[in-house]
Image (cartoon, coloured by chain):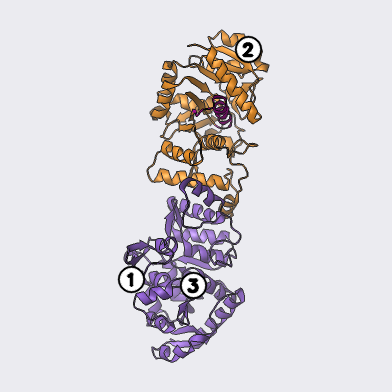
Chain colours: A orange, B purple
Amino acid sequence: MIVALAGGVGGAKMANGLEMASQAPITVVVNTADDFELFGLRICPDLDTVMYTLSGLANPVTGWGIEGDTRVTLDAIERYLGPGWFMVGDQDVGTHIVRTDALRTGHVLSAITAMMTEALGVRSSILPMTNDIVETIVVTPDGPLAFQDYFVRRKQQDQVDGIRFKGAGSAAALPDALDAIERAEVIVICPSNPLVSIGPILAIPGYREALKSSVAPRIAVSPIVGGKALKGPADRMMATTGHEVSALGVARMYEGLIDGLVIDDQDRGLAAEIESLGIAVRITDSIMNTIEDRKRLGRDVLDFAATVSR
Amino acid sequence: MIVALAGGVGGAKMANGLEMASQAPITVVVNTADDFELFGLRICPDLDTVMYTLSGLANPVTGWGIEGDTRVTLDAIERYLGPGWFMVGDQDVGTHIVRTDALRTGHVLSAITAMMTEALGVRSSILPMTNDIVETIVVTPDGPLAFQDYFVRRKQQDQVDGIRFKGAGSAAALPDALDAIERAEVIVICPSNPLVSIGPILAIPGYREALKSSVAPRIAVSPIVGGKALKGPADRMMATTGHEVSALGVARMYEGLIDGLVIDDQDRGLAAEIESLGIAVRITDSIMNTIEDRKRLGRDVLDFAATVSR
């Protein structure tokens, strides 16, 4: 049983690689602190990205959205409201409508996600980190911003002075997710943004404790390669919030929660210092451009896990 | 100032004909008792049909929906929920999303409709009959059915033993609509279903009184031609609820509310009996197949109105 903690695109690719490498369904615990409402529709970007990726629907170019999706509905909406700032494809809108309606009629996000993934033929379990509302707030010189405001509307241009997860302290970790972590044979922290993708999961009471008490090897894959984020603003966010922007910085953020860290070939010079934190290191090509890359990295992670003891 | 009372397709075509014939914006008071929720979206079929027709977006083949609209979102929804029974096009979904969100954030249907029609370049005023919820219930041998259940899902196969307008008695007629009727120079009851399109409007306190106290000529156009409904189940519904299925039957339903009735050439044999009710008659080709037909019928209605006195 493999359990992965994931955000969006990087997490989805890694989860897919772990599925392929293990040739078995896995459990993916997904960040929901980026979720928001647009036109009254509840949108869960990370859940959708993982779901679309594991069902084979994902757009392989962007990593998010559905391949070949059109934007007729969004154009119609903008005919009434003027230009917007968030892209939703027509198939995507179908997801948002079904989810929003199910939430309004009293279903919880985890049950809705289970229904959806089953309908899409996903064999792995995709679990929202919580059924409660948690919201990432990005503190900037212009004041606090809702995550999608910062991330999409303002295109990650603001300096990030701090990050808060509103509601995390009182949110209930998903029982199935805690249970999966407890029973896991391997736990993988995907190469997602440590601050705003993995951070919200770890901010919910129960997850840190579950990771600490698990007997499974816990492996993280560094999303920072050669001092840069593979995707998104993780590097800049880490710098302005006082973290070293490197695989070593990632190791320090996860210290006490992981047994091993997968780093890229170009970061091999950091291995000794990471190992001095008591974290085993696997050096490999960690960049996932192709489907084959995902599978290969998945295999590397699992091979590495087999060599790491608690 | 022309005021038209309208349901869906027939009403929309007539309203468009009146606009073209008068070369001026008109006011259309539209039935909303067919409105319903689908996937949590508020759908107003008659308002949409009138809005799409007067904005030039309408599908000229079906009369409803938007020309060239696709169904990508609906297919995506059905991927999760299985086959449905109501067609919503992608552009159409945009309308429903914007309306539903605006309703949920506290706007009234009339204000939302005004915003939408302005965005679509409609010069006429399209007014919902009320901002309150009124629901047509069709009584059948299988029990009461919500209107769209009867009309779309069960394809109008049930025998209609009776019709109720739930909420009509306590609904508030739209003040702008009553005001328009009071100030009207011509009032037209469009060739819509008298029972379930015009009926709900007349069931709301205020409309009958406004029609009665108006000094404008009040002209109805018969939706029954040669003993058959031009479209939809009006003929069967009239028969099973005790009405004569003819232009004469229509005249009797509107007795006391209209000064003149436009009937088709093939119903000229009914003219004398209709006139004996104190209702003037205009005999013309009342079938609107083409855009030109709409305009011609609009001109006929206005010419006729000019000859009818109260």
Residue B229 magenta-drawn?
A: no
Q: CA distance from mark 1 to mark 3?
A: 20 Å
Q: Which residues are magenta?
A: A8-26
Hey, what amino acid is under mark 2?
Leu
- Residue B120 position, x and y percent, is 58, 60
**Residue position marked by numbered label 2 in the rendering:** A270
Indicate which disc, 1 or 3, sits on the residue closer to the N terminus.
1
| Chain letter belonging to callout 1 | B
| Chain letter belonging to callout 2 | A
Local packing at callout 1 (Cα closer than 10 Å; few below 14, some 14-19, many 20+) is some
- At mark 2, the secondary structure is helix
- Residue A210 position, x and y percent, is 42, 20
- Residue A30 position, x and y percent, is 49, 30
- Residue B60 position, x and y percent, is 59, 67
Hey, what amino acid is under mark 1?
Asp
Relative to A254, is A246 on the left or the right? right
Relative to A52, is B166 on the left or the right? left
**Residue position marked by numbered label 1 in the rendering:** B161
- At mark 1, the secondary structure is loop
Q: CA distance from mark 2 to mark 1?
A: 82 Å
Residue A14 magenta-drawn?
A: yes
**Residue position marked by numbered label 3 in the rendering:** B231
